Image: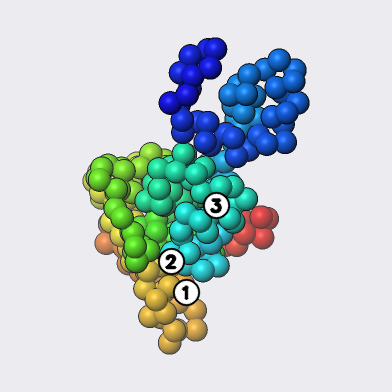
Amino acid sequence: MFEDERGVYPRRHVARDVYYCREELHNQVISGVSTVEACGMAGRARLDDAPERLVRAAVGLLAEQGPSALKVRTVASASGLSTMVVYSHFGGIPELMSAVADHGFKELGAAFGRVPVTEDPIADLFVMALSCRRLARENPHLYDLMFGLSTRATYRPLSDADLRLSGHSPAFREAHAHVTAACERLVDSGRVERQKPEVIAAQLWSLVHGYITLELAEHFVEFDDAVVQVLRPMGVNFSVGLGDERERAEASHESGARLYDSIVQGR
């Protein structure tokens, strides 16, 4: 701990801020501002976006090199920040990885939010499934991290299970809420047997992510178009199993595919 005329100033703040205020420090001090206060002013001005920069750098490293690239020094270098900033804002790599997973779920939730609410909830759900598949294919390592499918070899898990499990993440819950809401509209439509929407959402979530995981692992290479030959018929069968008519379910999935294409083309 350090002290100035204002009282105690934490050492970790001094260490963090001094790194960022070398150029500004002299001008602030000769203007009558204390050394500690000058460092703090300059450091805070430059650190406002540090968490976002670190997360985005980690996302980029995941896409380019995989989870083994997520090291404090590597992430700090990619973000143009110091290693002490990583520790200051996140505590370490496990906490940063949790923030990166949340970033992925926020992107997924944003993608779900761009799906228009139509009079056909099955079509809407299929658009969400295709949107999730697109996100997974754009950054497979991020997708794996979001759903706990892979970690760094030196990964140290968080001690708090609520922080470790993505299902407890507010970002995950916000994304998943779009799926549950569409399932609620499906039940209210009378097309399927009445049951709890959250149960249907959990079943559909399992179906879609099971397919995506297998596709990313190249288990469907023998198919010319795995979406048309595997995912879409599976979605139809799932809808029929819930109580929908097959022809109507097939029409909804075809409609959802067209709607998805229009959304992608408009990006």
Q: Quadrant of the N terminus?
A: top left
Residue 265: % across, % down: 66, 60
| Within-10-Å neighbours for mark 1: few <14, some 14–19, many 20+ | some
Q: Nearer the viewer, residue 10 or 214?
A: 10
Q: Are marks 2 and 3 in contact (CB under 8 Å)?
A: no
Looking at the image, residue 201 sits to the left or right of residue 28; the answer is left
Q: Quadrant of the C terminus?
A: bottom right
Seen at 44% across and 43% down, the residue is: 87
Residue 111 visible in this rendered orientation of the protein:
no
- Tag 3's secondary structure? helix
Q: Which residue is mark 2?
A: 68
Q: Nearer the viewer, residue 138 or 243?
A: 138
The colouring scheme, among rainbow, by chain, secondary structure or one colour, is rainbow
**Could you tell me the amino acid type at mark 2?**
Ser
Identify the mark at residue 76; answer none if there is no mark: 3
Q: Which residue is mark 1?
A: 228
Looking at the image, residue 155 sits to the left or right of residue 178; the answer is left
Relative to 57, does residue 28 appear above or below in the rendering? above
Looking at the image, residue 109 sits to the left or right of residue 57; the answer is left
